[in-house]
Amino acid sequence: MNTIYSKYSIQACCSALHLSQRGFKSWQIKHQNAISNSLEDDLKSCFETHKCRAGAPKLAHDLYAMGYKTSARTVSRRMVDLGLRARHPKKFKPTTDSKHNLHISPNLLERDFKADKPNQKWVGDITYLRTKDGWLYLATVIDLYSRAIIGWQMSHTIDAKLITDALQAAYATRGKPAGVIFHSDRGSQYCSELFRGFIKQAGLVQSMSRKGNCWDNAVAESFFKSLKTEAVYGFALVSRDTMRARVFEYIEMYYNTIRRHSTIGYVSPKMLEQRREAVLKRRLYRSKLRQELACVK
């Protein structure tokens, strides 16, 4: 219709179709209002699905997937009109102790946070979560290809067993791959004999950030910032058991499966890995088909 309007006037179109201009303009206003109301309803629905965690850019991609062609700027204006406001992050605070004389591994990552496929580069870190029962510590392992949390563990003590359990979970979940670079900061837990022993046993390659440089492990820090902003800050203090359940819900039911990441094209980690698996299956099918055709010839 827009192409027709650019060539012919509304008056000419209405005359050709035997319609009144007043009737057409009345329909046009009602149609635009209906679209606007539908957009606002779906925007509210998306915002609630993300539990007030997502901002305009992510919500714009959700709406685009639903068939709306709207920009992040338009979504931002609609959010202001509707009183929808996403949570904002707080400043970073270091949680690990790097003042020790234990063995330090070289920095193999060098802030190259891109990976061509899963199980090339993993990063790990520890953060603390305040509860009514005291501190609860969370250790995570992230695959840099999809930004998926592939292993995590929680404990009321911050020790080498915590991070070793998290890495063991990631190692088992990913099918025990060898040669993966595992990067972390220089915390004493990551330099411990227990952790380094598992690294060696599993055939992984250890890498560490430079001293006092949190940006060398920025992806891990970014996840903790998102977690605390979207699932911890602004809520009343809860018990350790409730916090464990909240972290499980955030990681397994939201972050890995629903939350869109700008660094991987505004899709979730699960979406990205599923797309890759689908591409590999198609390639394998075509390869087998070519081999079968070659045998027939």
Image (tube, grey):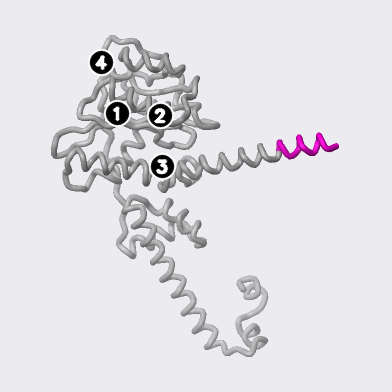
Dot 4, crowdedness within 10 Å: few (<14), some or many (≥20)? few
Q: Estimate the spatial distance between the alpha carbons at disc 3 and disc 4, rounded to whole Å.
A: 34 Å
Q: CA distance from mark 4 to mark 1?
A: 16 Å
Q: Nearer the viewer, residue 85 or 274?
A: 274
Q: CB of mark 3 within 8 Å of CB of mark 2?
A: no
Q: Which residues are magenta?
A: 287-297
Q: Position of residue 210 (x, y in %)?
A: 37, 19
Residue at 17% over, 38% down: 131
User: Residue at label 4?
Assistant: 99
Residue, disc 3 = 256
Quarter occupied by residue 11: bottom right
Residue at 33% from the left image edge and 41% from the top image edge? 226
Using the numbered discs, state the Cα–Cα distance from disc 4 to disc 2 in whole angstroms. 27 Å
Quadrant of res 196: top left
Residue designated by label 2? 170
Residue 78, x across and y down, in percent: 38, 63
- Side of 146 where 7 appears, left or right: right
Magenta segment: does it hold 290? yes
Residue 170 picture location, percent across and down: 40, 29
SS type, badge 2: helix
Sequence order check, earlier mark of 3 and 1: 1
| Callout 1: SS | strand
Residue 269 is inside the magenta segment? no
Of marks 3 and 4, the one in the foreground: 3
User: Quick one: label 2 or label 1, which is nearer the N terminus?
Assistant: 1
**Majority secondary structure in the magenta region:** helix
